[in-house]
Image: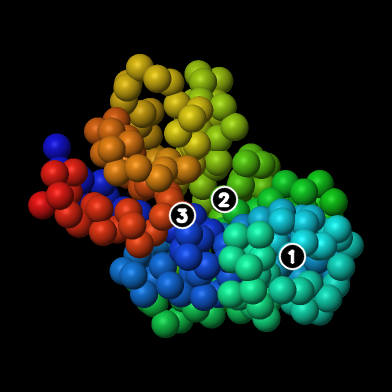
């Protein structure tokens, strides 16, 4: 089987191998490399503004012992998102972006799609109505290019009920009980960490959804997942995986 049977690559938190994750340059880099799909994470500031960051604590992103949930949007966007533990001073001055800034990137890439993960810490702090509603308000101009995803099933269900936006459920478990929930929800996408999949190489569940399998760093694993029915492969190794897929598993 040739690697070209892997249908799509998704840039996990942007081109996160070469840029700090969830930043404007990282997402733009992924689109410039030819990817049509990127995934980002969203938390909510103290004053209700969606900001693009994975952890609610700033320890890993900015070496600060503070929570974005306790900060205003103005305070958050003044914080360097430089990930100095990975990059040193290379990206000093690069800031945490607002979701409103991030989605404007889509205007330059009309074929691009942004998967926006609603983080559970913000849902727990501010409630589903506020978090989902505020995110929907921000993405409205580019809603057709956005997919709202979350581990939190009520959040994605509410997003669909309120707006009809495309949704994706990020699975915590891959079991028969979860499959029944998927069949009831009928999302456009299902996301799953490849470590949660059964090791018997069985085909993935089929339904209304497309599969996005994440934490993929090796071409051989991507090819195997495509055989099992994966429609999208999510990776941080954007440049390397793109090159390897074009060449194929035999280096052709």
Q: Which mark is residue 236?
A: 3
Viewer-nearest of discs 3 and 2: 3
- Residue carrying label 1: 62
Residue 236 picture location, percent across and down:
46, 54
Residue at image coords 29%, 58%: 242
Q: Is residue 35 above or below residue 207?
A: below
Question: Vertical placement of 139 versus 222: above or below?
Answer: below
**Residue 91: percent from left, percent from top:** 60, 75
Give the mark, 1 or 2, whose residue is nearer the N terminus: 1
* Residue carrying label 2: 149
- Please state the horizontal and vertical placement of residue 157, each as a whole percent of the image: 61, 45
Residue 181 vertical position relative to residue 188 in the rendered view, above or below? above
N-terminal label among 3 and 2: 2
Q: How is the image coloured?
A: rainbow
Closest to the observer: 246 or 190? 246
In the image: residue 123, left or right of residue 83 = right
- Residue visible at 36% across and 74% down? 32
Is disc 2 surrounded by few (<14), some (14 to 19) or many (20+) residues within 10 Å?
A: many
Is the Cβ of the residue at disc 1 closer than 8 Å to that at disc 3?
A: no
Classify residue 200 by image quadrant.
Answer: top left
């Amino acid at each position: 089987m040739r690697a070209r049977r892997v249908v799509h690559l998704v840039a996990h938190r942007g081109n996160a191998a070469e840029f700090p994750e969830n930043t404007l340059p990282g997402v733009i880099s992924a689109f410039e490399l030819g990817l049509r799909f990127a995934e980002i994470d969203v938390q909510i500031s103290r004053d209700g503004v969606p900001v693009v960051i994975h952890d609610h604590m700033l320890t890993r992103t900015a070496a600060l012992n503070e929570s974005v949930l306790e900060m205003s949007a103005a305070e958050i966007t003044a914080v360097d998102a430089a990930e100095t533990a990975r990059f040193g001073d290379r990206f000093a001055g690069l800031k945490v972006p607002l979701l409103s800034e991030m989605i404007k990137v889509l205007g330059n890439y009309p074929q691009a799609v942004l998967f926006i993960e609603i983080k559970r810490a913000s849902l727990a702090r501010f409630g589903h109505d506020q978090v989902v509603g505020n995110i929907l308000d921000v993405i409205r101009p580019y809603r057709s290019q956005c997919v709202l995803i979350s581990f939190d099933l009520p959040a994605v269900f509410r997003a669909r009920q309120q707006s009809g936006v495309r949704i994706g459920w990020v699975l915590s478990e891959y079991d028969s009980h979860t499959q029944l929930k998927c069949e009831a929800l009928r999302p456009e996408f299902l996301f799953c960490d490849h470590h949660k999949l059964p090791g018997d190489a069985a085909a993935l569940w089929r339904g209304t959804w497309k599969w996005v399998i994440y934490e993929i760093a090796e071409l051989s694993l991507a090819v195997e997942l495509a055989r099992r029915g994966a429609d999208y492969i999510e990776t941080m190794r954007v440049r390397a995986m793109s090159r390897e897929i074009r060449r194929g598993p035999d280096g052709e």
